[in-house]
C-alpha cells in the first residue's frame, strides 16, 4: 500500500542551494515545503550543495526524512580560489615568482564612479558568488531526471544560479518548470549600489528576463514582487505569476526553559544588517527620546544579533555612542544554533525589522508573527508595511522619518502580545507552512497536468 502511494506521487526535482541544515533563513522555506509535499501527493527529490560549502550549519536543524537528497560539490570561483591560496600557502612561498598569480589583486581605478577593480570583482562573481555550483549541479540533475523519472522542476533563489540550472534542464528535457523567487533579481537593492557597474545591472536584467520567459510558472513570495514582474514583463501572461508567501511552522514555539524576569523592555533584531537596511535614523530616534526624557534609559535594552556591516556600526556609534557605552544598545554575534536563536527571539518584548526593499518581506517577519510579540519595522511603504497593517501585528515607520520612528517606538512599547491560541486562530490557515505547501502542491500538479496534456506553451 505504501509502495503504491509512493509510486503514484508526482516526482519533482527541487533545486535549492539553501536547504537544511543550512542556517540561511531561505532554507527554512524550501525545507518545510519538502517536509509537507508528500502529504499532498508530491515526492520531492532535492538537489543541493554539500554541507561543507555552507556558510553556517546548524546541526540541530535536520532535513526531512524519507526523501532523496542529492548533495553535490561546488567548484571554487576565482576569488575563492585566490583567498584559499592566500590562507594556505606561507607568505615566503607566495613571494616566489612561480606564484605570481596569488599576489594581491592591484587593479587601477578609473576616474569614474566605478573602478576597474569593481568591474573585475563583478565579473568574477557573476551571476553570483555560487557560480561554481552550476556545472556539478547540472550534471547531478541530469542523472536525477532519468533515475527518478522527474515530472516537474522547482527551483528557488537566491542564489539565482539555481534558476540558471533549472533553465538549462527546461531547455534540454522540456520538463515543466516553476521558478520560486524569494527575492527580486534585477530589482534587488543590493545589486543596484553606486559601485555596481551598469553592465552587471543589464546582465542581471537579461538573465532574469530569460528565466521568466522559460519558466512555466513564476512564484513570488510577496504580492508587490509579483506585480513588479507583471508590469516589467507584460508579454508574459499574468497567469504565469503566482504569489506564495513565506510562513511559520510548529517548531516556532516558546522554549519551556525560558524564564525572563526583568523590568526592562527588550527589543531584539535577529539577522544581518546590510545594503539598504538602515539603523542610523533608528539610533537617532532612540537617542532623541532619551535626551528629551520621553524614554527612560534604564527601561529598555536593544539587542542586534547577527552580522552588521561597518557603515551601520559607524552610524550606531555616531548617533548612539552614549547608549552603546551604557549597553542600552548592543551588537552581538550571529547565533548559529536554531534553538538558541529561538530563545533570544522569545525573550523579546518587541521584535525589530529593518527592510531595504519595497518588494520584499524578510522571512523573519513570519517567525516573529508566530510569537505574537509586537513588531516594529523600519521600512518604506511596500510589501512589509502592507502585511503589518493587514495583520495588525505591529507598527512601522519610514527610515527617513526620525520623529516618526520615535512615535512608532512609543506606540509599539505599549502593545500587548497575542497568545498562542490567538495567533493560531488568526493566522495558521494563511501562514502555516502546511497550508502554504498545499497551495504549492496544487500549482505543481496543475503544471504537470498541463504538460502531460500538451498544453504547455513553446519557448524561444
Image (spheres, grey):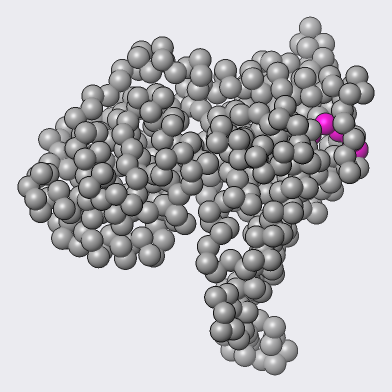
Quarter occupied by the N terminus: top right
Quick check: 57 left or right of 398? right
Quick check: 27 left or right of 2? left
Rendering coords of residue 277 (x, y %):
41, 52
The quadrant where residue 105 appears:
bottom right
Which stretch did the figure color magenta? 173-177
At a point 20% along the width and 62% down the height, the residue shown is 321
Quick check: 143 left or right of 162? right
The quadrant where residue 352 appears:
top left
Magenta span main SS: loop
- Closer-to-camera residue (458/250): 458
At a point 14% along the width and 48% down the height, the residue shown is 289
Rendering coords of residue 24 (x, y %):
53, 44
Rendering coords of residue 183 (x, y %):
58, 43
Rendering coords of residue 358 (x, y %):
48, 43
Vertical position of residue 277 compared to residue 69: above or below: below
Residue 117 forms part of the magenta stretch: no
Q: Is residue 278 visible?
A: yes
Amino acid at each position: 500500500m505504501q509502495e503504491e502511494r509512493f509510486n503514484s506521487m508526482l516526482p519533482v526535482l527541487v533545486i535549492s542551494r539553501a536547504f537544511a541544515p543550512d542556517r540561511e533563513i531561505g532554507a527554512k522555506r524550501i525545507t518545510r515545503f519538502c517536509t509537507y509535499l508528500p502529504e499532498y501527493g508530491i515526492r520531492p527529490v532535492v538537489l543541493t550543495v554539500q554541507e561543507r560549502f555552507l556558510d553556517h550549519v546548524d546541526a540541530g536543524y535536520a532535513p526531512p526524512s524519507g526523501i532523496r537528497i542529492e548533495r553535490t560539490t561546488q567548484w571554487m570561483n576565482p576569488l575563492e580560489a585566490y583567498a584559499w591560496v592566500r590562507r594556505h600557502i606561507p607568505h615566503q612561498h607566495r613571494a616566489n615568482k612561480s606564484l605570481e598569480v596569488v599576489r594581491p589583486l592591484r587593479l587601477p581605478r578609473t576616474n569614474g564612479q566605478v573602478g576597474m577593480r569593481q568591474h573585475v570583482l563583478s565579473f568574477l562573481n557573476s551571476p553570483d558568488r555560487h557560480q561554481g555550483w552550476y556545472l556539478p549541479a547540472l550534471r547531478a540533475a541530469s542523472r536525477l531526471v532519468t533515475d527518478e523519472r522527474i515530472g516537474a522542476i522547482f527551483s528557488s533563489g537566491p542564489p539565482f544560479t539555481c534558476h540558471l540550472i533549472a533553465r538549462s534542464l527546461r531547455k534540454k528535457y522540456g520538463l515543466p518548470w516553476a521558478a520560486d523567487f524569494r527575492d527580486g533579481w534585477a530589482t534587488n537593492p543590493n545589486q543596484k549600489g553606486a559601485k555596481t557597474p551598469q553592465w552587471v545591472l543589464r546582465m542581471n536584467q537579461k538573465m532574469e528576463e530569460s528565466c521568466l520567459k522559460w519558466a512555466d510558472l513564476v512564484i513570488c513570495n510577496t504580492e508587490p514582487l509579483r506585480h513588479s514582474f507583471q508590469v516589467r514583463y507584460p508579454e508574459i501572461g499574468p497567469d504565469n505569476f503566482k504569489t506564495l508567501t513565506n510562513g511559520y511552522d510548529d517548531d516556532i514555539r516558546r522554549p519551556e526553559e525560558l524564564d525572563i524576569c526583568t523590568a526592562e523592555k527588550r527589543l531584539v533584531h535577529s539577522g544581518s544588517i546590510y545594503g539598504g537596511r538602515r539603523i542610523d535614523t533608528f539610533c537617532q530616534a532612540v537617542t532623541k527620546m532619551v535626551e528629551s526624557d520621553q524614554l527612560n534609559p534604564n527601561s529598555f535594552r536593544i539587542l542586534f544579533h547577527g552580522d552588521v556591516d561597518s557603515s551601520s556600526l559607524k552610524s550606531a556609534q555616531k548617533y548612539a555612542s552614549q547608549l552603546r557605552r551604557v549597553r542600552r544598545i548592543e551588537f552581538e554575534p550571529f547565533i548559529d544554533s536554531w534553538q538558541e536563536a529561538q530563545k533570544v527571539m522569545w525573550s523579546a518584548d518587541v521584535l525589530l525589522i529593518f527592510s531595504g526593499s519595497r518588494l520584499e518581506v524578510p522571512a523573519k517577519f513570519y517567525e516573529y508573527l508566530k510569537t505574537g510579540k509586537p513588531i516594529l519595522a523600519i521600512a518604506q511603504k511596500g510589501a512589509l508595511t502592507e502585511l503589518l497593517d493587514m495583520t495588525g501585528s505591529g507598527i512601522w515607520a519610514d527610515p527617513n522619518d526620525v520623529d516618526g520612528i520615535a512615535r512608532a517606538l512609543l506606540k509599539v512599547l505599549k502593545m500587548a502580545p497575542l497568545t498562542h491560541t490567538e495567533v493560531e486562530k488568526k493566522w495558521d490557515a494563511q501562514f502555516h507552512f502546511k497550508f502554504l505547501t498545499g497551495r504549492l502542491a496544487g500549482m505543481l500538479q496543475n503544471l504537470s497536468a498541463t504538460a502531460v496534456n500538451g498544453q504547455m506553451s513553446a519557448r524561444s
